[in-house]
Image (cartoon, coloured by chain):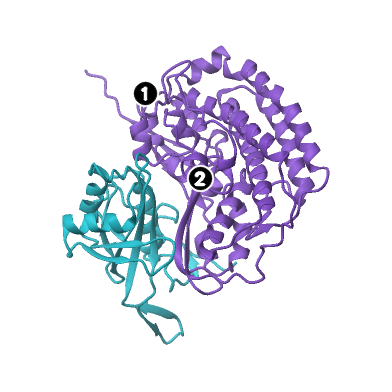
Chain colours: A purple, B cyan
Amino acid sequence: MAVKTEELVLNMGPQHPSTHGVLRLLVELDGELVTDVKPIIGYLHRCFEKHCEHLTYPQIIPYTDRMDYLASMYNNFGYVTAVEKLAGIQVPERVEYIRVIMGELQRIASHLIALGTYGLDIGAFTPFLFLFRDREKILDLFEMTCGARLLYNYMWVGGVSHDIPSDFVPAVKKFIKEFRPTIVELNDLLTYNKIFVERTANIGILPAETAINYGITGPNLRASGVKWDLRKNDTYSIYNKFDFEIPVGEGKVGTVGDSWDRYYVRVLEVEQSLRIIEQAIDNIPDGDVFEAVPKRIKMPKGNVYHRVENPKGELGYFIMSDGKNNPTRVKVRPPSFVNLAVLGELSRGHLVADLIAILGSLDIVLGEIDR
Amino acid sequence: MKTSEEIYNILKEKFGEEVILNFNTAEPIDAIIEVNPSKINEVSKFLRDSEELKFDTLMLLSGVDDANGTKVKDENEIETIQGGTLSVYYHCHSMEIGHKVTLRVSTPRENPQVQSVERIWRAADWHEREAFDMFGIKFLNHHDLRRILMPDDWGERYPLRKDYVDPEYYNGIKIPY
């Protein structure tokens, strides 16, 4: 008698430590092999876009904080620059510098969580603690400036909510000096760790062509070898003033576009962000940060799609205005939402344990997927 | 690198006025090319494959309620919109060449149907599901068109339509708690 086998459907999540939030994965298994993955999302859905239709433009800013809550500064950044583009507001140079510094600090903080929790997914606990210790220092810098540690509501249309305090610049310099050795330490502890490399190299290979067709952006796209960064390729704010490189995946320990590359690109990006901050911190011009903040935003009739390079990828805001105080439609393009869609394609044919390694390497935040 | 107007002219020459309906520059910042909803898949395929255009990514696909119908009040003073259109906006971008274009299709509110572009840009898959979820726009030939953010049993209610009213009960549970 022949042995009869059938596929097993495994339900992973919504409450599961390695799904990074309330994400449910319907996994179809053939023995230990994954044959299909269907992500089921929406558990955090609060309809941000409907809220926006009933709020004025500045009132929306705190809501953007709550999308990618690990990179709130950058969500603010994207939103306010989109509104400024549509309303035609020019911001003072000092504000641009402060925004870039805050944005890059936020990128480091977000990447530190990505790297730390990725180690955690694989089973390495120590790097997570080291990286969280340094992330705390960045949060201290934010707290020093605007009082908040997670949800800042810092960037305003035309300005920022608080000017930087006088001891901010030395504090940032001190942080950079103290933080640099952590990257070396991280490489020793985790990046080139034999077990870690075995678990992540050649796992979940994403070819460049597939990545582009799926609309993947950010470190996940760069890991596939595509030199694409909106800060350089579709520059905004004052990023064209700074000298930095776009790290891409090279398949150092495996194939280009594998999970290890996605991890390592983030390590390299942290260094590039430090470089940008170093260049900016000494050249902050004087000025009034509230100079261009309008008392009432006079929005023309029209529509704009504006995008910025969020730590997780291309964050876009599509804003439609009919000239009234509140927008008729705000649609967000959250990078994690688009990046997660490729999960099924990536994990087909891998083992269940590798599915965790692949999901972790995509670095998703459910707050912005569900909005 | 081409401007929206040049792209409009190329498309118009290729597909004719039946398909490429209008070029809207009246709205500032992003000019919009209006396309026939039953031909959007062919236009998209051309945009992607044409040597001189090469639109390899779809940045964003968004549904919009134009709310241009007539407002009707029923006996309970609940306002609904009848007639008019729903729209879908496509923001395309070419990584290789670096130009962008915005397309729009409009479809009647009572029976909104648009051809799917999911097979041309896989990025459209979840965006189309979201537009279906939030506006009830049906994307023809989509391989897996079901709700994505709202619960599957939310019924024929589409939250981002302008005349959406919160239901009082969901599965026997009172909603304004």
For this view, does A43 lie left or right of residue B39?
right
Q: Residues within 10 Å of mark 1 (few under 14, many from 20)?
A: few
> Quarter of the image containing the N terminus of chain A?
top left
**In this rendering, would A14 be left or right of A91?**
left
Residue at 54% x, 63% y is: A88
Kindly identify which residue carries mark 1: A31
Q: Nearest to the eye among marks 1 and 2: give it.
A: 2
**Vertical position of residue A221 compared to residue B53: above or below:** above
Q: The disc numbered 2 marks a residue on which chain?
A: A
Marks 1 and 2, how far apart at CA: 48 Å
Q: Looking at numbered disc 2 in the image, what kind of residue is underneath it?
A: Thr
Label 2 Cα crowd, 10 Å radius (few <14 / some 14-19 / many 20+): some
Q: Residue at x 49, y 68 (%)?
A: B169
Which residue ends up furthest to the bottom in the rendered image? B75
Find numbered disc 2 in the image and state the secondary structure of the residue it sits on.
loop
Image quadrant assignment for residue B3: bottom left
Q: Chain of mark 1?
A: A
Residue B42 to residue A232: above or below: below
In the foreground, A363 or A13: A363
Q: Is residue A181 visible?
A: yes
Residue pointed to by mark 2: A235
- For the point 44% across and 17% down, the residue is A254
Mark 2 and mark 1 in contact (Cβ < 8 Å)? Answer: no
Instruction: Work out whether disc 1 and disc 2 sit on a shared chain.
Output: yes
